[in-house]
């Protein structure tokens, strides 16, 4: 719940419980009792949970990995800004050995590839425009699909680039905004496209 002005902030905990029942295993989330936990899921492993921890000022975002058996957690990535940090969830690759992460730490929201330990492998996109939406990775071909403001802020075309940062190209042909949903093997996608004066098609 969101507190009314002057009311005490709710205290939030993260817990894991077996589908067969039993006790809740509480996750160690750190000492900040006012922190937000905006996203969480399993990190492509049955015993490891990832979660995001956002401070109350919302200018520091930590990505943590936690063992669901012991509850112990560790910070693998921190994204900070002097004013505001957008919340972006990691996209896990290679069975959880690597992940993609969106960050505006350089002024524009770009894609970064990290190892599971939080070590930066390399920057995937490096351009004077923002990545607007990450739609997935075809791991067989090493292709990342995303929308971006590369053609200006009023359009959201679908683009592709290699995980190695090479081969940047535009995928969608029409101008305007594109909301995309890929098939599991990335052989096909459904594109809901619209632009000024043209309703979604």
Image (tube, helix red, strand yellow):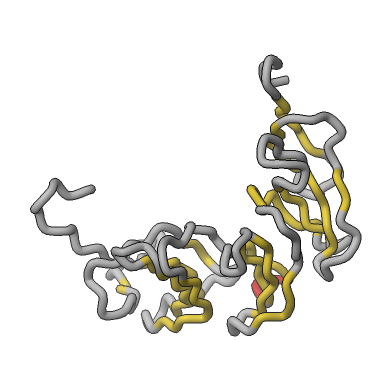
Q: Residue at x 70, y 39 (%)?
A: 156
The quarter of the rendered structure image containing the C terminus is top right
Query: Is residue 182 toward the left or the right of residue 63 in the image?
Result: right
Q: In the displayed orientation, state which residue is furthest to the left.
A: 6
Q: Residue at x 41, y 79 (%)?
A: 69
Q: Residue 34's image quarter?
A: bottom left
Residue 192 screen position, x and y as percent: 71, 28
Residue 125 screen position, x and y as percent: 75, 63
Q: Residue at x 9, y 53 (%)?
A: 7
Q: Residue 102's image quarter?
A: bottom right
Q: Residue at x 32, y 62 (%)?
A: 36
Q: Residue 9's image quarter?
A: bottom left
Say which of 146 and 129 sits in front.
Answer: 129
Residue 124 screen position, x and y as percent: 76, 67
Q: How many labels were placed on the picture?
A: 0
Residue 150 screen position, x and y as percent: 76, 48
Q: Is residue 124 visible?
A: yes
Say which of 145 and 57 sits in front.
Answer: 57
Q: Is residue 49 visible?
A: no
């Amino acid at each position: 719940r969101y507190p009314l002005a002057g009311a005490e902030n709710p205290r939030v905990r993260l817990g894991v419980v077996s589908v067969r029942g039993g006790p809740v295993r509480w996750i160690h989330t750190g000492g900040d009792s006012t922190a937000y936990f905006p996203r969480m899921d399993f990190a492509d492993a049955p015993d490891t949970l990832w979660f995001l921890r956002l401070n109350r000022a919302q200018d520091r975002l930590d990505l943590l990995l936690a063992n669901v058996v012991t509850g112990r957690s560790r910070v693998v990535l921190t994204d900070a800004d002097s004013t505001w940090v957008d919340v972006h969830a990691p996209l896990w690759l290679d069975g959880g050995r690597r992940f993609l992460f969106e960050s505006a730490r350089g002024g524009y929201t770009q894609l970064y590839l990290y190892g599971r330990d939080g070590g930066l492998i390399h920057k995937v996109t490096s351009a004077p425009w923002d990545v607007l939406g990450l739609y997935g990775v075809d791991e067989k071909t090493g292709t990342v699909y995303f929308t971006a403001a590369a053609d200006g802020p009023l359009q959201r075309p679908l683009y592709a680039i290699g995980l190695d940062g090479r081969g940047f190209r535009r995928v969608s042909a029409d101008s305007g905004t594109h909301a995309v949903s890929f098939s599991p093997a990335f052989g096909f996608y459904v594109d809901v496209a619209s632009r000024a004066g043209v309703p979604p098609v």
